[in-house]
Amino acid sequence: MKSRIRIVLLVVLVALLASPVLASGLPEGFVYITDVIPTAKLDIRYYTGYNFVGTRIEGYHAPTAILTKEAAEALKQAAEILDEQGYYIKVFDAYRPLRAVEHFVLWAQDLDDQKMKADFYPEVDKERLFELGYVALRSGHSRGSVVDLTLIYKDTLDEVDMGSPFDFFGEISHHGTDLITPEQEANRNILRDAMVAAGFEPYPEEWWHYRLADEPYTDRYFDFPVDSPDFQSWRGVLDEAMEKSVERARQTMNENIGGPFGAAIFDMEGNIIVVASNSVLRDHDPTAHAEVNAIREAGRVLGTHDLSGYILYATGYPCPMCLAATIWSNISHVIYGARPEDAEAIGFRDDFIYRFIEGGRVDSSILLIEEYGRDACVELFQEYAEMQKQIY
């Protein structure tokens, strides 16, 4: 079954048409939504790991949103209608490459992968996703005139309550469902009425999904990546950071210093500050992961514990410890190479730590946590507070 669908999708890719990409990064006739609608906010879930698949989706190289010019202009009309009512639009997805659709299809066939079920399809059997229409061999998104979006309040930028989250598979996400409150239905109707007035058609099963009625490409599907000019300008820096991290990691594993993990930290001008690798085996230090080593070395080189404005590249998705260390260092942008499942495939597993944290840190089979001596320790804290020292 998997081979047959992959062949079908490859035929789609070849016969249907990937358009040549221009030097600007977009085929003729396509635009970035935020170039047309500066007030639009983006939450591109398929660029992140928080989506129904649980990892970044193939073809999403930047957290941006693209539409055909016609769809973008129509969406601008809807945005102007909503602006007068006190709302901005937030876009979850727009143009979607064919390779992303193939990623969805292959994921749907893997019935053992249920890690995002609780968040996105708790009451739907994964084996029925094709039958119920939640996953398909082709998507109108790949024609470039479909958009997934919601409303946010202009004054707070908080999302409007629509009764169910984006990409939730279930009847509660349908237009006309009786599983939401009248207020939630009214909110959905505000979005629907503006979109319909601007020339879009709603999709009955998904309150967030709208297609331009008069779309310019009715039978043409595209496969250029979701990219951005900013990302393209950084590609040389990223390539260098990746190559140096991989080289250092390869040296590390060949010398039995640690695992196949490397990391680099660079600044906003593209200057690589440090390159480090995992040294757990050599140092007999379970915390000597590549990312932690890179953060420690960058602090020494720069003479500061505050790495605000720096970017971390890692050969693998950071473990919980490394993510925490990154946040403590004030690095706010992480770029990674291999995905968690790639590390898991060769025996490295971080999932049990995430599950322990998400489960409230109460699984004593992983770690027993007990409280003792709180009064004395709180007294110590109070002494520090009275000294008015730096909080970090």
Image (cartoon, rainbow, N blue to C red):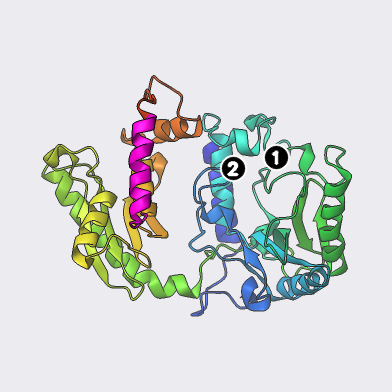
Q: Nearer the viewer, residue 145 or 355?
A: 355
Q: CA distance from mark 2 to mark 1?
A: 9 Å
Q: Residue at x 76, y 68 (%)?
A: 215
* Mark 1 lies on residue: 169
Position of 377 compared to 161: left or right?
A: left
The answer to whether 228 is drawn above or below residue 391 in the figure is below
Is residue 344 something one can see in this rendering?
Answer: no
The answer to whether 336 is drawn above or below residue 254 in the figure is below
Q: Mark 1: which amino acid? A: Phe
Is 387 magenta? The answer is yes
Q: Which mark is residue 52?
A: 2
Quadrant containing the C terminus in the rendered view? bottom left
Crowd around label 2: few <14 · some 14–19 · many ≥20 (10 Å): many
Residue bounds of the magenta highlight:
374-392
Count every numbered label the image shows and give the total.
2
Is 383 magenta? The answer is yes
Q: Mark 2: which amino acid? A: Phe
> Within the image, what quadrant is residue 297 found in?
bottom left
> Within the image, what quadrant is residue 146 found in?
bottom right
